Amino acid sequence: MEMKRSEFLAYVAPSFLIMLALMVFPLFFSIYLSFRNFTYGGPASSAGGNFVGFENYLYILSSSRFWGGLSFTLILVLVSGTVSIVLGLTIAILLYEARKGEGFFIAGYLLPYTVPPVVTTMVFGWLFRNNWGYVDYLLSQIGININWFASKWPARALLSMHTVWWMMPFVVLVFYAALQAMPQHFLEAARVDGASYLQRVYYVIIPYLKPLIIFVGMILIQDIFRIFDNVAVMTAGGPGNTTETLAYYNYQIAFGNLSIGMGSAISVVTLAFTFLLLGPFIHKTYLEQQNI
Amino acid sequence: MKKVARIAGSLSWRNIIVYGGLLIWLVVSAFPFLWTVLTSIKPLKAVFAMPPQWIFQPTLKAYHQLWFAGGEFPRYLLNTIIVVGSSVVISLAVGLPAGYALSRYSKKLGFVLLFLAFIFRAFPRILFVIPFYQMSRIIGLYDTKILLILVFVAVNQPFTIWMLRSFFMNIPESLEESAMIDGCSRFGAFVRVIIPLMGPAIITSGIFTFLLAYNNYLIPVSLSADRSVTMTVAIAQFGVSSVQGWTQAAAGGVSIALPIVALILFFQKYIVKGLAAGAVKE
């Protein structure tokens, strides 16, 4: 008994009207604002700013701060994304091999992912504070003294490490769930053929998980492009804007300077870059979902 | 003798690698939180002692200052409860029929809407926050809880309907069909037959919409100033304030994390299931 079209529309109407009013409309409003030089308290602010054509976009694309934010965001995607997937896969396999106590480990693993990022970033950053943080103390005991917050690459490294620590639970649990659902005869067949453990991982487990690795990568890209809280709490973009992500730079322009027009333009450009990266994944999902 | 043999047997290299690896990551995951709990109950002098002190006279002073000294934190908690609670209830109420219909309607239009929701999920949040800021200033909704509730419901809707749909897919259509043959309307069958079977799925989706709203910082920090400020905004302020504020910030962090810890302890299975549902479907 297939659902009738009118029935279908009635059921989805509330949800899609909300999305239409509160997402589609703001999206177009954002695009509209991005063509205006609207700044609170600035000239012409009472009139909602003037139409300035592509001026905001040209300004952004020629601003080194924008490219800095974009490149750090891409570094996070590349470095933290890759490390999360490799490390996450390792822990997921260990969890799969453990025959007892998985629940206990999972409970602890979930903490960095489920506690609000403003809190986790604060507590993670504390550990690296000079003369106070426990990790900084341990490092100084073996003769390593780094001021994590004072220069570009240590601060970037800190945020990258935090991103891995924060995203790991998601990666681990998605892979772990898939491993549990994996048909046993795959591994059995490889075992009978005399494959070593690492061979089995490489030739059986990884190919089995491949579609999922792509899915996880896609979610990681989305989440890393949204990283804002972590930067705001850990480094506030410093030293000297070097740890700004695209989202953080966007916030600073829109709400720090109250340049609503420019801020809108940055978010439209961010959207374009997100979809440039996600394009192939989205196309693939489109083809897959069409067939069900 | 038997016991010794069993322990020796379980101490194989395999187990040492497996449990050793798991234990190391457990320490990495949980240690920062342990450190924060200790900081929150340390006297100020012990907080800055070098080398770090493990033994000290614990005190609840920071918690007292945070919650009972006439500060704003209790009000932020109340704001958070109202905003997050309402957005979870509304998200589910609106998302359930949509997720159901998307799982039962297989024509082109259903696919198009589903795919649109999938695209919306990838949008940067600030793309919506800026126009919301502008519009709410114009119509006078800026810095109200209603605004935050509306925004949370909207930005979480794509995620909510995708997750609910994947759970509805697991419920065989024959169930509501037999109810409809017995004279039930489709809506009657949906409410009386299907929804009662969705209990665990509703809990799972509820947890995730809760987390998305409870953990968010960008939306409340951009769209509230005073009246509707939530706990995440307040704690971020602490983080950058003076060094003396760190015990209070730690106490605040622990306070915010406690409901999440409770959630993990009581609903761990649902959280794991929800994470898996996003990925391992069909």
Image: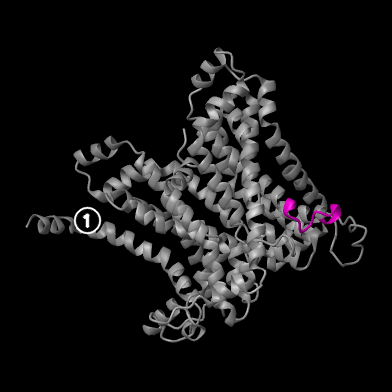
Does any portion of residue A79 appear in the rendered image? no
Question: What range of the chain is rendered magenta?
Answer: B137-147
Q: What is the count of numbered marks?
A: 1
Asked if residue B100 lies in the magenta stretch, the reply is: no
Q: Nearer the viewer, residue A218 or B279?
A: B279
Query: Which percent across, then down, holds residue A185?
Result: 27, 35
Residue visible at 63% across and 25% down? B108
Q: Nearer the viewer, residue A227 or A11?
A: A11
Residue visible at 78% across and 68% down? A257
Q: Nearer the viewer, residue B57 or B131?
A: B57
- Residue A53 drawn above or below residue A25: below
Asked if residue B141 lies in the magenta stretch, the reply is: yes
Does any portion of residue B134 appear in the rendered image? yes
- Residue B91 drawn above or below residue A86: above
Q: How is the image coloured?
A: one colour
The answer to whether residue A263 is left or right of residue B28 is: right
The residue carrying mark 1 is B14
Q: Quadrant of residue B136?
A: bottom right
Circle 1 chain: B
State the quadrant of the N terminus of chain B.
bottom left
Amino acid at dot 1:
Arg
Tag 1's secondary structure? helix
Q: Residues within 10 Å of mark 1 (few under 14, many from 20)?
A: few
Query: Which percent across, then down, holds residue A10?
Result: 69, 27
Query: Which percent across, then down, holds residue A95?
Result: 33, 52
Q: Quadrant of residue A121?
A: bottom right
Query: Which percent across, then down, holds residue B22?
Result: 33, 59
The answer to whether residue A180 is left or right of residue B213 is: left
Residue visible at 43% across and 53% down? B265
- Residue A208 drawn above or below residue B226: above
Residue visible at 48% across and 60% down? A112
